[in-house]
Image (tube, helix red, strand yellow):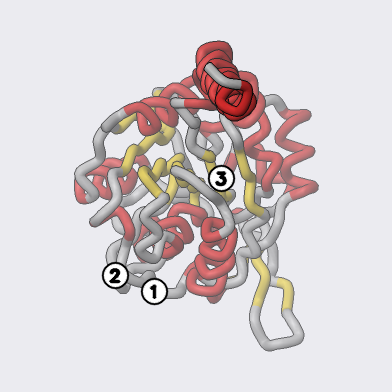
């Protein structure tokens, strides 16, 4: 081999060695960190309901974060079904990769209207949540079967500048009505930090529901005094729920009193093909 040929071969050998090194490093990275390289976990997005706020998901979030799931707990405005759903839609549109959308109580109505053909949303999980059909309202659904005692526990409405009304649960009645299976101390904290929902939001008709095209899972408490268990069972059956869990003795805030059970159901929604 002459001198000129040797000079040309050396750069080619260097390039080949560099390429081989990149391949080996990439393969080693995938081997050492297979979850990030091959099995990206979906983002779990949570939407709280009326008379609650984002921290109501803390027990569930803590467990999912420990398992490596990315999570987002949305601050639901509680102003109206369409406007709240549009707000959640904007958040979903900014998330890359698969999404599991979870809604509690009125938040169920919101997630039902927030998907808007977003192909990243792979599953809906209703945690003591409304799953309305087109034209149905939260007030109408909660009264479809007997058992809701929410009305008499509401405080006098707070008048808003736009003529609307904000609704709260009386703090003295919050524990028994909303969260009977959590401690008194925790219920008092929840009562003091509750976020109001507008009267108009609870009476606003739902749009076309996402549960007709997106697989759904349901969990609720047998002693839910806001949305009767019979209503939950009806909505789950109508939505062809993949799995429905009725937690015996649980209140409306089943995600607070039974976070492990809620996490297990969410993971079923994640892993079911």
Is residue 6 shown to the viewer in this render? Answer: yes
Which quarter of the figure has residue 62? Answer: top right
Question: Is mark 2 in CB contact (under 8 Å) with mark 3?
Answer: no
Expressed as whole percent of the image width and height from the top left, the position of residue 208 reads: 30, 69
Expressed as whole percent of the image width and height from the top left, the position of residue 228 reads: 38, 45
- The tag earlier along the polypeptide, 2 or 3, is 3
Name the residue at 20% across, 44% down. 240
Quarter occupied by the C terminus: top left
Which callout, 3 or 1, points to the residue nearer the camera? 3
Residue that numbered label 1 is attached to:
205
Identify which residue, 198 or 88, lies in the foreground.
88
Expressed as whole percent of the image width and height from the top left, the position of residue 36 reads: 54, 26
Which quarter of the figure has residue 248? Answer: top left
Tag 3: Cα neighbours inside 10 Å, few (<14), some, or many (≥20)?
A: many
Identify which residue, 239 or 69, lies in the foreground.
69
Name the residue at 43% across, 26% down. 267
Separation of marks 3 and 1 at Cα, in angstroms: 22 Å
Residue 134's mark? 2
Answer above or below: position of 112 versus 269: below
Residue 254's mark? none
Find numbered disc 1 in the image and state the secondary structure of the residue it sits on.
loop
Question: Is mark 1 in CB contact (under 8 Å) with mark 2?
Answer: yes
Is residue 26 shown to the viewer in this render? Answer: no
Name the residue at 40% across, 27% down. 265
Find numbered disc 3 in the image and state the secondary structure of the residue it sits on.
strand
Separation of marks 1 and 2 at Cα, in angstroms: 7 Å
- The tag earlier along the polypeptide, 1 or 2, is 2
Name the residue at 48% across, 60% down. 110
Residue that numbered label 3 is attached to:
46
Position of 194 with respect to 244 (left or right) is: right
Separation of marks 2 and 3 at Cα, in angstroms: 22 Å
């Amino acid at each position: 081999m002459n001198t000129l040929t040797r000079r040309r071969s050396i750069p080619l050998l260097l390039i080949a060695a560099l390429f081989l090194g990149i391949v080996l490093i990439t393969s080693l990275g995938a081997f050492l960190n297979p979850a990030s390289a091959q099995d990206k976990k979906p983002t779990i997005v949570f939407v709280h309901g009326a008379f609650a706020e984002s921290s109501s998901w803390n027990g569930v979030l803590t467990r999912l974060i420990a398992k490596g799931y990315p999570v987002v707990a949305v601050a639901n405005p509680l102003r109206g079904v369409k406007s709240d759903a549009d707000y959640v839609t904007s958040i979903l549109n900014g998330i890359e990769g698969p999404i599991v959308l979870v809604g509690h109580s009125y938040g169920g109505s919101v997630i039902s209207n927030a998907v808007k053909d977003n192909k990243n949303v792979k599953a809906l999980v209703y945690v003591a949540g409304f799953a309305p059909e087109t034209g149905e309202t939260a007030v109408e659904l909660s009264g479809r079967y007997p058992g809701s005692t929410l009305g008499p526990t509401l405080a006098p409405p707070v008048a808003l500048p736009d003529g609307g009304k904000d609704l709260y649960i009386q703090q003295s009645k919050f524990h028994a009505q909303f969260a009977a299976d959590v401690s008194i101390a925790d219920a008092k904290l929840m009562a003091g930090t509750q976020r109001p929902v507008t009267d108009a939001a609870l009476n606003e008709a739902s749009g076309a529901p996402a549960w007709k095209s997106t697989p759904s899972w349901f969990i609720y408490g047998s002693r839910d005094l806001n949305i009767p268990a019979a209503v939950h069972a009806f909505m789950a059956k109508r939505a062809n729920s993949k799995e429905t869990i009725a937690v015996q003795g649980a209140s409306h805030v089943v995600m607070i009193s039974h976070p492990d059970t809620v996490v297990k159901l969410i993971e079923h929604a994640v892993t079911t093909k």
